[in-house]
Amino acid sequence: MKTQVLLALTAAAALTATSSLAQTAWPERTINVIIGASPGGDTDFNARTMARYFEEITGTGMVITNMPGGGATIATSAVRDAEADGYTMLFGHTGHLIVTEVSGLADYGIDDFEICCIPAIDQGAVFVASKDSGLLTAADVAAREPGSVTFGTEFGGYSHLQGLVFQQATGAEMTIVDTGSASEKIAALLGGRIDVAGIAYGAVQDYHAGGQMVVLGQPNPERNALLGDIPTFTEQGVDFVMNNPYIIAFPKGTDPEIVAKMGEVMQQITEIPEYAADLEAGFKQPVAFLPQDEAMTRLNEIRDAYMPSREALQAAR
Protein backbone atom coordinates (compact mmCIF):
# COMPACT_ATOMS: atom_id res chain seq x y z
CA MET A 1 0.00 0.00 0.00
CA LYS A 2 2.84 2.38 0.92
CA THR A 3 4.50 1.59 -2.38
CA GLN A 4 1.33 2.45 -4.27
CA VAL A 5 0.97 5.73 -2.38
CA LEU A 6 4.62 6.60 -3.08
CA LEU A 7 4.21 5.85 -6.78
CA ALA A 8 1.05 7.95 -6.92
CA LEU A 9 2.78 10.88 -5.24
CA THR A 10 5.76 10.59 -7.59
CA ALA A 11 3.48 10.52 -10.62
CA ALA A 12 1.56 13.55 -9.35
CA ALA A 13 4.79 15.46 -8.81
CA ALA A 14 5.97 14.64 -12.31
CA LEU A 15 2.63 15.74 -13.76
CA THR A 16 2.79 19.02 -11.82
CA ALA A 17 6.32 19.67 -13.09
CA THR A 18 5.29 18.94 -16.66
CA SER A 19 2.25 21.20 -16.38
CA SER A 20 4.40 23.96 -14.91
CA LEU A 21 6.88 23.65 -17.77
CA ALA A 22 4.11 23.71 -20.37
CA GLN A 23 2.74 26.92 -18.84
CA THR A 24 6.09 28.69 -18.69
CA ALA A 25 5.33 32.37 -19.17
CA TRP A 26 7.68 33.62 -21.85
CA PRO A 27 8.24 36.23 -23.03
CA GLU A 28 7.26 38.56 -20.20
CA ARG A 29 9.74 41.34 -20.96
CA THR A 30 12.00 42.68 -23.68
CA ILE A 31 14.50 40.19 -25.13
CA ASN A 32 18.05 41.29 -25.85
CA VAL A 33 19.08 39.96 -29.27
CA ILE A 34 22.85 40.13 -29.67
CA ILE A 35 24.45 40.01 -33.11
CA GLY A 36 28.12 39.97 -34.03
CA ALA A 37 27.77 42.42 -36.89
CA SER A 38 27.48 46.14 -37.53
CA PRO A 39 24.15 47.84 -38.32
CA GLY A 40 23.05 47.78 -41.94
CA GLY A 41 24.36 44.41 -43.06
CA ASP A 42 22.46 41.23 -43.89
CA THR A 43 22.69 39.74 -40.38
CA ASP A 44 21.48 42.96 -38.80
CA PHE A 45 18.68 43.19 -41.37
CA ASN A 46 17.50 39.64 -40.71
CA ALA A 47 17.59 40.12 -36.94
CA ARG A 48 15.64 43.40 -37.05
CA THR A 49 13.09 42.02 -39.49
CA MET A 50 12.56 38.98 -37.27
CA ALA A 51 12.22 41.21 -34.18
CA ARG A 52 9.52 43.34 -35.79
CA TYR A 53 7.31 40.35 -36.56
CA PHE A 54 8.12 38.72 -33.20
CA GLU A 55 6.56 41.71 -31.47
CA GLU A 56 3.50 41.53 -33.71
CA ILE A 57 2.95 37.87 -32.77
CA THR A 58 3.86 37.92 -29.07
CA GLY A 59 3.24 41.53 -28.05
CA THR A 60 6.75 41.60 -26.57
CA GLY A 61 9.59 43.64 -27.98
CA MET A 62 13.16 42.79 -28.83
CA VAL A 63 16.14 45.12 -28.65
CA ILE A 64 18.95 44.50 -31.11
CA THR A 65 22.45 44.90 -29.67
CA ASN A 66 25.23 45.10 -32.24
CA MET A 67 28.56 43.72 -31.02
CA PRO A 68 30.84 43.56 -34.08
CA GLY A 69 34.49 42.62 -33.94
CA GLY A 70 36.65 39.62 -33.23
CA GLY A 71 34.97 37.57 -35.95
CA ALA A 72 31.77 37.84 -33.86
CA THR A 73 33.44 36.30 -30.79
CA ILE A 74 32.61 39.39 -28.72
CA ALA A 75 28.93 38.76 -29.39
CA THR A 76 28.96 34.99 -29.02
CA SER A 77 30.95 35.20 -25.79
CA ALA A 78 28.42 37.68 -24.39
CA VAL A 79 25.56 35.29 -25.12
CA ARG A 80 27.44 32.22 -23.91
CA ASP A 81 28.18 33.92 -20.58
CA ALA A 82 24.72 35.47 -20.14
CA GLU A 83 22.11 34.26 -17.67
CA ALA A 84 20.15 31.36 -19.16
CA ASP A 85 16.76 32.94 -18.51
CA GLY A 86 15.53 33.22 -22.10
CA TYR A 87 16.04 36.97 -22.31
CA THR A 88 19.41 36.98 -24.03
CA MET A 89 19.50 35.49 -27.51
CA LEU A 90 22.05 35.21 -30.28
CA PHE A 91 21.12 35.89 -33.88
CA GLY A 92 24.12 34.88 -35.95
CA HIS A 93 25.18 32.56 -38.71
CA THR A 94 27.61 29.72 -39.35
CA GLY A 95 30.48 32.19 -39.64
CA HIS A 96 29.86 33.22 -36.04
CA LEU A 97 29.45 29.80 -34.44
CA ILE A 98 31.24 27.36 -36.74
CA VAL A 99 33.92 29.17 -38.74
CA THR A 100 35.25 30.88 -35.61
CA GLU A 101 35.70 27.47 -34.00
CA VAL A 102 37.33 26.03 -37.12
CA SER A 103 39.67 29.01 -37.39
CA GLY A 104 40.60 28.95 -33.74
CA LEU A 105 39.16 32.40 -33.04
CA ALA A 106 36.90 30.71 -30.47
CA ASP A 107 37.43 27.68 -28.27
CA TYR A 108 33.70 26.93 -28.31
CA GLY A 109 31.03 26.21 -30.90
CA ILE A 110 27.44 25.15 -31.48
CA ASP A 111 27.57 22.54 -28.71
CA ASP A 112 28.08 25.31 -26.15
CA PHE A 113 24.69 26.90 -26.88
CA GLU A 114 21.06 25.87 -27.01
CA ILE A 115 20.42 25.94 -30.74
CA CYS A 116 16.83 26.95 -31.41
CA CYS A 117 16.48 26.82 -35.18
CA ILE A 118 17.75 28.00 -38.52
CA PRO A 119 15.43 31.00 -39.11
CA ALA A 120 16.75 31.82 -42.58
CA ILE A 121 19.42 30.87 -45.10
CA ASP A 122 21.49 33.45 -46.89
CA GLN A 123 21.07 32.66 -50.58
CA GLY A 124 21.74 36.22 -51.61
CA ALA A 125 25.52 36.12 -51.31
CA VAL A 126 27.57 36.79 -54.43
CA PHE A 127 31.19 37.36 -55.37
CA VAL A 128 31.68 40.86 -56.69
CA ALA A 129 34.61 42.57 -58.37
CA SER A 130 35.41 46.24 -58.75
CA LYS A 131 34.82 47.66 -62.21
CA ASP A 132 38.47 48.70 -62.52
CA SER A 133 39.68 45.13 -61.86
CA GLY A 134 38.54 44.02 -65.33
CA LEU A 135 37.27 40.74 -63.87
CA LEU A 136 34.00 39.34 -65.22
CA THR A 137 33.97 35.63 -64.35
CA ALA A 138 35.55 33.04 -62.07
CA ALA A 139 37.76 32.00 -64.98
CA ASP A 140 39.13 35.55 -65.19
CA VAL A 141 40.25 35.37 -61.58
CA ALA A 142 41.92 32.00 -62.09
CA ALA A 143 43.73 33.28 -65.19
CA ARG A 144 45.44 36.17 -63.38
CA GLU A 145 49.01 36.04 -62.14
CA PRO A 146 49.25 34.45 -58.66
CA GLY A 147 48.72 37.06 -55.97
CA SER A 148 47.65 39.82 -58.38
CA VAL A 149 43.97 39.67 -57.38
CA THR A 150 43.24 41.03 -53.90
CA PHE A 151 40.35 39.44 -52.00
CA GLY A 152 38.90 41.44 -49.12
CA THR A 153 37.56 39.66 -46.07
CA GLU A 154 37.46 39.59 -42.29
CA PHE A 155 40.14 37.17 -41.10
CA GLY A 156 38.74 34.13 -39.38
CA GLY A 157 35.20 34.83 -40.55
CA TYR A 158 32.80 33.26 -43.01
CA SER A 159 33.91 35.29 -46.02
CA HIS A 160 37.51 34.31 -45.31
CA LEU A 161 36.51 30.67 -45.65
CA GLN A 162 34.58 31.58 -48.82
CA GLY A 163 37.79 32.94 -50.32
CA LEU A 164 39.77 29.83 -49.42
CA VAL A 165 37.15 27.46 -50.83
CA PHE A 166 36.85 29.59 -53.99
CA GLN A 167 40.61 29.33 -54.51
CA GLN A 168 40.53 25.58 -54.09
CA ALA A 169 37.64 25.26 -56.53
CA THR A 170 39.10 27.52 -59.24
CA GLY A 171 42.84 27.08 -58.79
CA ALA A 172 43.17 30.85 -58.34
CA GLU A 173 45.84 32.25 -56.05
CA MET A 174 44.58 35.49 -54.56
CA THR A 175 46.11 37.82 -52.00
CA ILE A 176 43.69 37.70 -49.08
CA VAL A 177 43.58 40.83 -46.93
CA ASP A 178 41.60 41.83 -43.85
CA THR A 179 39.20 44.64 -44.73
CA GLY A 180 36.60 44.13 -41.99
CA SER A 181 32.81 44.24 -42.20
CA ALA A 182 30.53 44.28 -45.24
CA SER A 183 30.34 48.07 -45.32
CA GLU A 184 34.13 48.25 -45.16
CA LYS A 185 34.44 45.77 -48.03
CA ILE A 186 32.16 47.92 -50.15
CA ALA A 187 34.23 51.01 -49.41
CA ALA A 188 37.42 49.10 -50.27
CA LEU A 189 35.94 47.88 -53.57
CA LEU A 190 34.79 51.35 -54.55
CA GLY A 191 38.14 52.81 -53.55
CA GLY A 192 40.10 50.27 -55.57
CA ARG A 193 41.90 48.87 -52.54
CA ILE A 194 40.61 45.33 -53.21
CA ASP A 195 39.49 43.55 -56.37
CA VAL A 196 37.03 40.89 -55.16
CA ALA A 197 34.83 40.22 -52.12
CA GLY A 198 32.06 37.88 -51.06
CA ILE A 199 29.06 39.92 -49.97
CA ALA A 200 25.26 39.99 -49.89
CA TYR A 201 23.85 41.11 -53.24
CA GLY A 202 21.32 43.35 -51.52
CA ALA A 203 24.18 45.45 -50.19
CA VAL A 204 25.75 46.02 -53.61
CA GLN A 205 22.87 45.79 -56.08
CA ASP A 206 22.80 49.56 -56.63
CA TYR A 207 26.52 49.57 -57.40
CA HIS A 208 26.03 46.63 -59.75
CA ALA A 209 23.18 48.38 -61.52
CA GLY A 210 25.24 51.55 -61.74
CA GLY A 211 28.21 49.73 -63.27
CA GLN A 212 30.61 50.34 -60.38
CA MET A 213 30.80 46.64 -59.53
CA VAL A 214 30.66 43.39 -61.50
CA VAL A 215 29.02 40.25 -60.10
CA LEU A 216 31.18 37.19 -60.81
CA GLY A 217 28.59 34.63 -59.72
CA GLN A 218 26.42 33.24 -56.93
CA PRO A 219 27.60 30.27 -54.82
CA ASN A 220 24.20 28.57 -54.69
CA PRO A 221 23.55 25.03 -55.96
CA GLU A 222 20.84 26.47 -58.22
CA ARG A 223 20.07 30.03 -59.18
CA ASN A 224 18.33 32.12 -56.58
CA ALA A 225 15.68 33.56 -58.89
CA LEU A 226 15.51 36.72 -56.80
CA LEU A 227 19.01 37.59 -58.03
CA GLY A 228 17.87 37.75 -61.64
CA ASP A 229 20.23 36.49 -64.34
CA ILE A 230 23.32 36.11 -62.17
CA PRO A 231 24.81 32.67 -62.95
CA THR A 232 25.93 30.18 -60.33
CA PHE A 233 29.58 29.17 -60.17
CA THR A 234 28.44 25.63 -60.93
CA GLU A 235 27.14 26.90 -64.28
CA GLN A 236 30.62 28.27 -64.90
CA GLY A 237 32.13 24.84 -64.33
CA VAL A 238 33.34 25.62 -60.81
CA ASP A 239 32.39 23.36 -57.90
CA PHE A 240 31.81 26.19 -55.46
CA VAL A 241 28.62 26.03 -53.37
CA MET A 242 28.32 27.74 -49.97
CA ASN A 243 24.97 28.58 -48.39
CA ASN A 244 25.11 30.34 -45.04
CA PRO A 245 22.32 29.47 -42.59
CA TYR A 246 21.45 31.98 -39.89
CA ILE A 247 21.19 30.67 -36.34
CA ILE A 248 19.06 31.51 -33.32
CA ALA A 249 20.68 30.31 -30.11
CA PHE A 250 20.39 30.79 -26.36
CA PRO A 251 22.89 30.35 -23.51
CA LYS A 252 23.44 26.74 -22.47
CA GLY A 253 20.90 25.64 -19.88
CA THR A 254 18.01 27.79 -21.15
CA ASP A 255 14.63 26.19 -20.46
CA PRO A 256 13.85 23.84 -23.41
CA GLU A 257 10.26 25.13 -23.35
CA ILE A 258 11.51 28.65 -24.09
CA VAL A 259 13.78 27.42 -26.86
CA ALA A 260 10.90 25.45 -28.39
CA LYS A 261 8.50 28.39 -28.13
CA MET A 262 10.97 30.68 -29.89
CA GLY A 263 11.22 28.13 -32.68
CA GLU A 264 7.44 28.02 -33.00
CA VAL A 265 7.19 31.81 -33.18
CA MET A 266 9.95 31.94 -35.79
CA GLN A 267 8.15 29.39 -37.92
CA GLN A 268 4.97 31.48 -37.70
CA ILE A 269 6.95 34.51 -38.84
CA THR A 270 8.19 32.67 -41.93
CA GLU A 271 4.58 31.97 -42.92
CA ILE A 272 3.68 35.69 -43.06
CA PRO A 273 3.60 36.95 -46.69
CA GLU A 274 4.82 40.42 -45.69
CA TYR A 275 7.88 38.88 -44.07
CA ALA A 276 8.75 37.11 -47.33
CA ALA A 277 8.31 40.40 -49.20
CA ASP A 278 10.63 42.16 -46.74
CA LEU A 279 13.37 39.55 -47.23
CA GLU A 280 13.10 39.82 -50.99
CA ALA A 281 13.19 43.62 -50.96
CA GLY A 282 16.04 43.79 -48.46
CA PHE A 283 18.58 41.20 -49.54
CA LYS A 284 17.00 39.14 -52.35
CA GLN A 285 16.58 36.34 -49.86
CA PRO A 286 13.94 33.61 -50.16
CA VAL A 287 12.20 32.35 -47.02
CA ALA A 288 13.73 29.30 -45.33
CA PHE A 289 13.28 27.65 -41.93
CA LEU A 290 14.65 24.53 -40.21
CA PRO A 291 13.39 23.45 -36.76
CA GLN A 292 15.78 22.45 -34.02
CA ASP A 293 16.50 18.83 -34.97
CA GLU A 294 16.96 19.57 -38.67
CA ALA A 295 19.00 22.65 -37.82
CA MET A 296 21.43 20.65 -35.69
CA THR A 297 21.84 18.07 -38.45
CA ARG A 298 22.58 20.78 -41.03
CA LEU A 299 24.97 22.66 -38.74
CA ASN A 300 26.94 19.54 -37.84
CA GLU A 301 27.24 18.69 -41.55
CA ILE A 302 28.58 22.17 -42.24
CA ARG A 303 31.03 21.93 -39.35
CA ASP A 304 32.38 18.63 -40.68
CA ALA A 305 32.71 20.11 -44.18
CA TYR A 306 34.64 23.15 -42.93
CA MET A 307 37.05 21.37 -40.61
CA PRO A 308 39.49 20.41 -43.43
CA SER A 309 40.14 24.16 -43.89
CA ARG A 310 41.15 24.57 -40.26
CA GLU A 311 44.90 24.73 -40.90
CA ALA A 312 44.59 27.23 -43.75
CA LEU A 313 42.31 29.50 -41.75
CA GLN A 314 44.56 29.45 -38.73
CA ALA A 315 47.71 30.04 -40.80
CA ALA A 316 46.27 33.30 -42.13
CA ARG A 317 45.59 34.74 -38.69
Image (tube, rainbow, N blue to C red):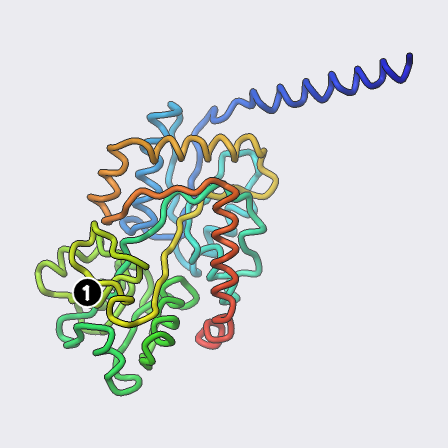
* Image quarter hosting the C terminus: bottom left
Tell me if residue 188 comes above or below residue 282 in the rendering: below
Q: Dot 1, how many residues are within 10 Å of its Cα: few (below 14), some (14-19), or many (20+)?
A: many
The percent position of residue 294, horizontal first and vertical second, equals: 49, 45
Compared to 103, does 10 lie above or below? above
User: Which residue is the site of mark 1?
Assistant: 215
- Report x, y in % for residue 267: 40, 34
Q: In which quarter of the image is residue 17?
A: top right
**Quadrant of the snapshot with the N terminus:** top right
Q: Where is residue 234 in the image (x, y as percent from the top left)?
A: 29, 66
**Residue found at the far bottom of this picture:** 145
Which residue does the image show at 49% across and 30% down from the upper left? 261
Q: Residue at x 48, y 61 (%)?
A: 100
Q: In this view, does 167 lie to the left or right of 303?
A: left
Q: Is mark 1 on a helix, strand or loop?
A: strand
Of residues 42 and 3, the one nearer the viewer is 3
Image quarter for residue 243?
bottom left
Does 88 sit above or below residue 93? above
Q: What residue type is labelled 1?
A: Val
- Above or below for 131 versus 183: below
- From where the camera sits, is residue 249 visible? yes
**Which residue is painted at 25% across and 56% down in the image?**
223
- What residue is shown at x 50% (from left), y 41% (from top)? 292
